[in-house]
Image (spheres, rainbow, N blue to C red):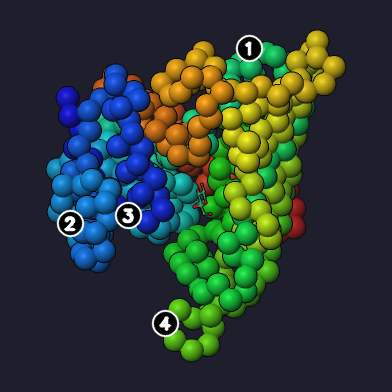
Amino acid sequence: MTLDIAFLGYGFMGKAHANALARLPMFFPDAPETNRAVLIGRNERAASEAAERFGFDRVETDWRDVVEDVDVFCNLGPNHIPAKPTITALESDVHVLCEKPLAADLETAKKMRNAARESEAVVATAFNYRFTPAIQLAKQLIKEDELGKIYRFKGRYLQDWFADPELPWNWRCSEEASGLGAVGDVGSHTVDLARWLVGDINHVTGSLSTQVADRPDPDGEGTRPVTTDDEYSALVEFENGATGVLEGSRVATGRKADNAIEIYGSKGALEFSLRRLNELRFKGSEDRGYQELLVTEPEDPYMDAWWPAGHIIGWEHAMVHQYYEFLTSISESQSHSPDFEDGVAVQRTVEAIRKSHERGEWVPL
Ligand code: SOE
């Protein structure tokens, strides 16, 4: 079986996803075969250049001409684009992988989730950090009860690409196009890891702030208002009684992609940072302090596919693992995790953080 794949979008995510598909057959020979069939983009010239570099057969400028005719549709565009092409693809049982957050708002995300429930297709929300080997090992340790009862989760994702007030206005500054700001973008990843590793969240309280209120208009003189948040902080309560502290920013000067978690349980604890993504810091019940586990042994998740132990991997490898799991779910007619139910749960959580900010009180989920 060769799966014909269409991408909508060819920016950072288009490049990362195309790289993952290109690497997949070399390192995971048992993965279903894929063909990078169509790249969809409104600007034909730019899309054609990207298609050539990313290894796509052809370009289309209108998603309507494509999404029902391929086997897999990957929606990698800005947050306000996703709903229609995704729903149309699902109505034809075309498998869909959608970048996070699922949509610009919860109602739209639910429509996408409902379309997935009605469809025979396999769906994925691209919470790629789950597929980092050290995070997979964290999940295993929690499953094996090495941490005992989990008391607390701490998670942060800090970036600084908006710290310069002269950065021109872009779609992420617009509530209409982006929905939420930092809380929806980097916050989605932290909420997904919290839910996946600890469990469902049932109460949140939080605050948002916009540090740079106006940015230079990219199309002319003057400035345009920023209607999304630059940073958020939240406290959360999990159904199982654990508590959590979450933080995210795109104006955290000096922090480029500081995605980190800490989990504390009755027997053990663990710590992960994307800055040292091949390592998991773990303290088991018999350990006096933390051990620094280098997660590159052949028995570590996904690592026998790559290099001999100690030869580290990078951010992009998790994207390869994500496609390995998603495409294998398709070939085995099984559901994939994270799916659109997870996408909606995360969207509900980040929107509840915003509601809590507006109301000044805890919000139940
Ligand atoms: C920008 O903040 C961004 O590209 C996010 O949208 C991604 O989800 C994150 O992985 C990297 O940074």
Rounded to the nearest angstrom, the CA distance separating label 2 from label 1 is: 48 Å
Residue 49 screen position, x and y as percent? 24, 59
On residue 270, the disc is none
User: Sequence-wise, which precedes: disc 2 or disc 4?
Assistant: 2
User: Sequence-wise, which precedes: disc 3 or disc 2?
Assistant: 3
SS type, badge 2: strand
Q: Is there a contact, CB below 8 Å, between mark 2 and mark 4?
A: no
Mark 3 CB lies closer than 8 A to ligand 1:
no
Q: Residues within 10 Å of mark 2 (few under 14, many from 20)?
A: some
Q: Give the amino acid type for the residue marked by disc 4 in the picture.
A: Asp
Residue identified by numbered label 3: 9
User: Sequence-wise, which precedes: disc 4 or disc 3?
Assistant: 3
Residue identified by numbered label 4: 219
How many numbered marks does the figure carry? 4
In this rendering, the answer to whether 269 lies above or below 349 is above
Residue identified by numbered label 1: 144
Residue identified by numbered label 2: 60
Q: Give the amino acid type for the residue marked by disc 3 in the picture.
A: Gly
SS type, badge 4: loop
Give the residue at x 67% y 45%. Answer: 156
Q: Give the amino acid type for the residue marked by disc 1 in the picture.
A: Glu
Residue 323 screen position, x and y as percent? 36, 32
Location of the C terminus (image quadrant)? top right
Rounded to the nearest angstrom, the CA distance separating label 4 from label 3 is: 22 Å
In this rendering, the answer to whether 79 lies above or below 200 is below
Q: Nearer the viewer, residue 142 or 88?
A: 142
Quarter holding residue 200: top right
